[in-house]
Image (tube, grey):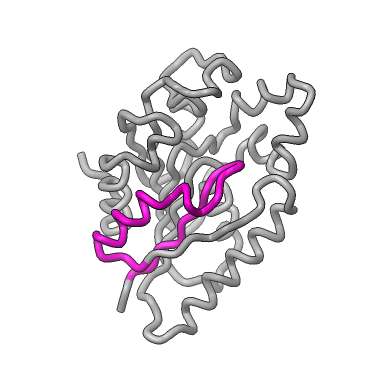
Amino acid sequence: MTEHVILLHGLWLRGFSMLALRRRLLRAGFAVQDFEYASVVAQPQRSLLQLRSAMRALMGSRPAPRRVHLVGHSLGGIVALECVRDAEDLPPGRIVCLGTPLTGSAAARGLLQWPLGARMLGYSMRALLDGIPAWNGAREVGVIAGSMPHGPGAWLGNFSGAHDGTVAVAETQLPGIADHCVVPATHLGLLLSATAARQTTAFLRNGRFEA
């Protein structure tokens, strides 16, 4: 039986942004698919229902995967956690978040100071501003943060600590997660990083990142 991974892109992006990570996960032996959702113009609940439906459909396939993992970049990590938080009829698996502002985004708050900021965030605004509650779900969650401080969100967020140019490392540290690591990558660079892909693979297989 295979191990399946569903990839979730971030705000303003599409599934093709995950191509490099997808290829590395395929080489690692996972079956991989992208999940496309409208990060700005669609109600979050609609995206969650569609993702749950996609996960359930995999369990009806032949051969059915042993586990269905979720890997989300930035906003995609929030979508992944909220999808499974209260859903008990989904297939088992782990979750990896890449550069996800789980406790809220200073860059998003900074963007709101601009005339079109609220429109650019759309229906994802509340999750990005407030973050999500501490994790108490059954699934193991691993979070990978970037530490290369280059990106358009740096001046919006006015970060005081380590960050990836868009999200601060501190914003990725949600109580209740199983493991956390930091890799030398920018926010978008997390999707291209061989180190981030290797750590993602390690967590999906073992529930822990490499030391």
Position in image of residue 19 (x %, y %): 40, 52
User: Which residue sits furthest bottom?
Assistant: 62
Query: Residue visible at 58% across and 19% down?
Result: 157
Position in image of residue 183 (x %, y %): 31, 32
Query: What count of labels does the image hold?
Result: 0
Q: Is residue 66 above or below residue 70?
A: below
User: Is residue 111 on the magenta stretch?
Assistant: no
Position in image of residue 178 (x %, y %): 38, 46
Position in image of residue 52 (x %, y %): 59, 67
Residues drawn in magenta: 3-31
User: Which residue sits furthest left?
Assistant: 211
Quadrant of the frame with the N terminus: bottom left
> In this orientation, which residue lies closer to the viewer: 108 or 24?
24
Query: Residue visible at 70% across and 45% down?
Result: 40
Q: In which quarter of the image is residue 158?
A: top right
- Residue 117 lies left or right of residue 21; in this view the side is right
- Residue 45 lies left or right of residue 59; in this view the side is right
Q: In this view, does 206 lie above or below 194?
A: below
Query: Residue visible at 48% across and 45% down?
Result: 73
Q: Quadrant of residue 50?
A: bottom right
Quadrant of the frame with the C terminus: top left
Query: Residue visible at 31% across and 65% down?
Result: 30
> In this orientation, which residue lies closer to the viewer: 126 or 28?
28
User: Is residue 24 on the magenta stretch?
Assistant: yes
- Residue 104 lies left or right of residue 182; in this view the side is right
